[in-house]
Image: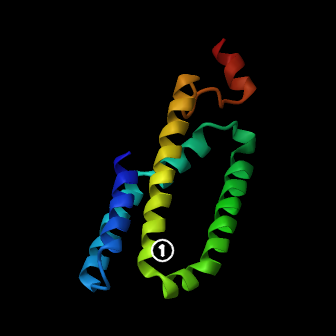
């Protein structure tokens, strides 16, 4: 949650930066701190530890590919958005960061309500049988 909020705040800082380089540098620094505290680290743990060993790499590769494809498409329109309405683009990124935060919190609540946690139930059948 803290990381997601920092990412949204960083885009807000950039949104009010009005072309001042020092403010943009501050926004990037805040974003990088938020990035380390939020999505990517959690994503890597959950995809590695929440799936059976025999499908981990395939699922992680698929999710990487989908993410890169979606953001690649957004990168096609970003220069146009930046040239026509820089502030609008930055506030759109604030909205995306807040939406990602909401989805992340909802996902964690959904998984926790069902007792799904990283590393639980992902062992190979032979390992489970040995424990019984």
Q: How many marks?
A: 1
Residue at image location 65% in from the left, 59% down from the top: 64
Name the residue furthest top: 132
Give the residue displayed 47% in from the left and 66% down from the top: 93
Element type where label 1 sits in the image: helix
Most distant residue in the left direction: 22
For the residue pair 53 and 96, the one nearer the viewer reads as: 96
Quadrant holding the C terminus: top right
Question: Where's residue 78, x and y in %?
Answer: 56, 79
- Left or right of residue 120, residue 89 in this image: left
Quadrant of the drawing holding the N terminus: top left
In this figure, which residue is indicated by the disc labeled 1? Answer: 89
Relative to 121, does residue 56 appear above or below in the rendering?
below
Left or right relative to 54: residue 16: left
Would you identify the image quadrant in which residue 53 lies?
top right
Q: Position of residue 125 (x, y in %)?
A: 74, 25
- Residue at 35 percent of width and 72 percent of height: 15
Q: Position of residue 94 (x, y in %)?
A: 43, 62
Name the colouring of the figure: rainbow
Residue 95 vs residue 75: left or right? left
Q: Residues within 10 Å of mark 1 (few under 14, many from 20)?
A: some
Residue depicted at x 68% and y 54%: 63
Q: Is residue 25 above or below residue 119?
A: below
Residue 19 location (% of width, % of height) = 32, 85
């Amino acid at each position: 949650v803290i990381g997601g909020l920092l990412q949204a705040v960083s885009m807000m800082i950039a949104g009010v930066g009005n072309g001042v380089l020092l403010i943009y540098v501050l926004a990037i620094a805040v974003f990088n701190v938020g990035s380390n505290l939020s999505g990517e680290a959690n994503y890597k743990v959950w995809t590695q530890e929440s799936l059976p060993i025999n499908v981990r790499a395939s699922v992680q590769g698929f999710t990487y590919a989908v993410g890169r494809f979606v953001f690649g498409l957004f990168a096609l329109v970003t220069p146009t958005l930046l040239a026509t309405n820089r502030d609008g683009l930055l506030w759109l990124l604030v909205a995306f960061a807040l939406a990602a935060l909401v989805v992340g919190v909802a996902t964690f609540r959904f998984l926790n309500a069902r007792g799904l946690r990283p590393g639980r139930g992902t062992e190979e059948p032979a390992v489970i049988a040995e424990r019984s």
